[in-house]
C-alpha cells in the first residue's frame, strides 16, 4: 500500500472534528518527507484542515456549514502529546470544576512539563504554566488538590475556611495509596505552606496520624492562612493561623 493510501486510510478512521498531528500517522517515522507532501495534497483538496503549525483536523459538516473542532478536542492538543498526557487543568477553571468558585475564566490555565506560553484557538484560550511536579495520569487528581491548597487565599469569591471544608471532603475519599503519594508529592514539589495544610487535612480526616509531614516543617515557621481556630482547632499543631 502506498504512503498516500496509508494516510487516507488512517484519516478515514478519525472522527469528524478530531485533531491530529504528523505523529498520529503510522508511517511518519519511516518517511517524514513523503508524509508531509501527502498531507499537503490532502490540505489542498480540503480533505483535511490545518488548525495550527503541525496540527490538523478532519472537517466536520453541520447544518450551517463546516464546524471547527470542539473546545474539548482543542484542549486535548494541549493536554496530550503523541498520545501521552503532559499536562492538567489548574487555576480558576479547576477551582470552578471542584465547586470552589462560580467564576468561569476566559483563559484556561494548564500546568505542563515545559516552558510558559499561550495558545489561542479563537474559541479557546489557554495559558500554559510549568507544572510543579512531573505529570503522570495517576497523580493528576492529587496534584490538582495540592494546587488548590497552594492558591487557597487566591481563589476568586472564596475564603480559606470554606475551601478547606470542601477539600476535607475530597481528602476523606483518598485511599491509602493516594495518601502516601500525596505526602511524597507535597514534600518534594510544594511549599511548606502546602505541606502544613496537607498535614492538617490528613489529620482532620483521620487519613494519617503519623508525624512525617510535621517533622519536615520548621517548628518556628508560622503560616498565615486566615483560618478560624474554632473551626479548625488542629491548625495550632501545624502553626497555621
Image: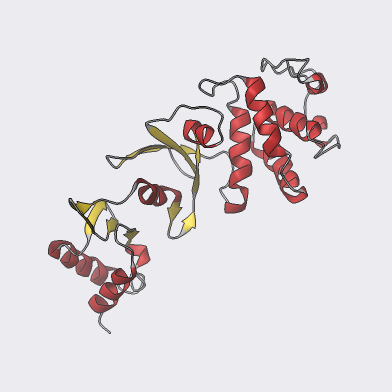
Depth check: 151 or 172 in front?
A: 172
Q: Is residue 17 left or right of residue 239?
A: left
Residue lying at 62% horizontally and 37% vertically, measured from the top left = 145
Image vertical order of residue 129 relative to residue 153, above or below = below
Q: Residue 125: give x, y in percent of width and height.
A: 34, 37
Residue lying at 29% horizontally and 71% vertically, measured from the top left = 12
Q: Quadrant of residue 212?
A: top right
Q: Quadrant of residue 45?
A: bottom left
Q: Quadrant of residue 124?
A: top left
Residue lying at 73% horizontally and 28% vertically, measured from the top left = 196
Query: Does residue 191 appear anywhere in the picture?
Result: no
Colouring mode (rainbow / by chain / secondary structure / one colour): secondary structure
Depth check: 151 or 160 in front?
A: 160
In the displayed orientation, state which residue is furthest to the right.
210
Depth check: 62 or 20 in front?
A: 62
Q: Quadrant of the C terminus?
A: top right
Q: Residue 186: give x, y in percent of width and height.
A: 68, 37
Q: Residue 143: give x, y in percent of width and height.
A: 61, 41
Amino acid at each position: 500500500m502506498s504512503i498516500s493510501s496509508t494516510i487516507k486510510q488512517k484519516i478515514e478512521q478519525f472522527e469528524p472534528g478530531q485533531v491530529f498531528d504528523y505523529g498520529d500517522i503510522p508511517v511518519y517515522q519511516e518517511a517524514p518527507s513523503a508524509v508531509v507532501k501527502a498531507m499537503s495534497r490532502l490540505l489542498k483538496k480540503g480533505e483535511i484542515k490545518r488548525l495550527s503549525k503541525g496540527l490538523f483536523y478532519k472537517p466536520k459538516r453541520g447544518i450551517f456549514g463546516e464546524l471547527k473542532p470542539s473546545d474539548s478536542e482543542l484542549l486535548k492538543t494541549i493536554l496530550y502529546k503523541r498520545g501521552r498526557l503532559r499536562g492538567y487543568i489548574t487555576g480558576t477553571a479547576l477551582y470552578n470544576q471542584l465547586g470552589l468558585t462560580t467564576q468561569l475564566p476566559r483563559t484556561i490555565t494548564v500546568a505542563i512539563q515545559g516552558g510558559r506560553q499561550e495558545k489561542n484557538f479563537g474559541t479557546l484560550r489557554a495559558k500554559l504554566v510549568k507544572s510543579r511536579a512531573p505529570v503522570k495520569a495517576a497523580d493528576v487528581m492529587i496534584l490538582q488538590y495540592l494546587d488548590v491548597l497552594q492558591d487557597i487565599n487566591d481563589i476568586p469569591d472564596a475564603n480559606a475556611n470554606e475551601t478547606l471544608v470542601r477539600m476535607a471532603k475530597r481528602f476523606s475519599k483518598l485511599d491509602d495509596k493516594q495518601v502516601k503519594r500525596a505526602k511524597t508529592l507535597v514534600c518534594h514539589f510544594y511549599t511548606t505552606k502546602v505541606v502544613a495544610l496537607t498535614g492538617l487535612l490528613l489529620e482532620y480526616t483521620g487519613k494519617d496520624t503519623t508525624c512525617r509531614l510535621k517533622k519536615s516543617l520548621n517548628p518556628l515557621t508560622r503560616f498565615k492562612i486566615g483560618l478560624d481556630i474554632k473551626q479548625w482547632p488542629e491548625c495550632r499543631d501545624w502553626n497555621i493561623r
